[in-house]
Structure formats: C-alpha cells, structure tokens
Image: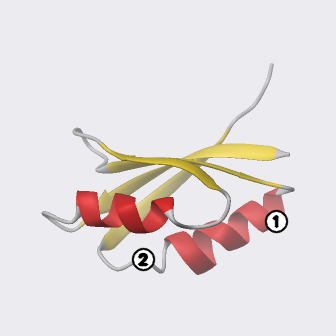
Amino acid sequence: MVQAYILVQTEVGKAAEVASAIGKIAGVTQADDVTGPYDVIVRAESENVDELGRMVVAQIQGVSGITRTLTCPIVHI
C-alpha cells in the first residue's frame, strides 16, 4: 500500500469546490481546503506507485480549477 499527500494549488476562490470534488475520487481518504501556499491538501492511498500516479494524473489533475499539484509519497524510516 502506498500513501501520499498531494498539495494542490487552485484558481482563486476555487479551493472548497476543488476539495469537495477530489474528496469523491476513489482512493482519496481526505481532502481539505487550507490557507498558505497550497489551497487543498489531499491524502490518498493506492496499491502501488504506478496506480497512485494514474490517480493523480488522470483523476485529480482533471478536476476543474486546479493549477498545480505536488505529490509527496509517505515514507516510513
């Protein structure tokens, strides 16, 4: 199981709408609109890194109002 935080920048005024849409995607466990340099922080999980990448590129980045994402896989050291 691979887990990651995905940091999302949105168009002005779109954070709540984007967080709501992302929260409905399979594999997303949490999506919150926040303040700061990123507008939405997402926690997601998938079976492997390839599946995580497909989720981000094909589903999350397809949500209207997103301008940029940064995916941060969780590591256990």
x, y (%) of residue 23? 48, 59
Asked whether the beta carbons under mark 2 and mark 1 sit within 8 Å of each other, the answer is: no
Q: Secondary structure at mark 2?
A: loop
Q: Secondary structure at mark 1?
A: helix
Inspect the image, locate mark 1, and give the three-letter code of the amino acid beneath it: Asp
In the rendered structure, find residue 18 and report the number of the disc placed on it: none
From the viewer's perspective, is 26 left or right of 48?
left
From the viewer's perspective, is 53 left or right of 39?
right
Residue sitting nearer the eye, 26 or 36: 26
Give the quadrant of residue 14: bottom left
- As measured in the structure, the alpha-carbon distance from the residue carrying label 2 to the one carrying label 1 is 20 Å
Residue sitting nearer the eye, 23 or 1: 23
Residue positioned 42% across, 77% down in the render = 63
x, y (%) of residue 18? 34, 65
Q: What residue does disc 1 label?
A: 50
Which residue is farthest left? 13
x, y (%) of residue 52? 73, 61
Inspect the image, locate mark 2, and give the three-letter code of the amino acid beneath it: Val
Task: Locate the C terminus and report the quarter of the image it occupies.
Answer: top right
Give the quadrant of residue 20: bottom left
Which of marks 1 and 2 precedes in the sequence? Answer: 1
Residue positioned 28% across, 50% down in the render = 39
Which residue is farthest top? 77
Residue sitting nearer the eye, 70 or 33: 33
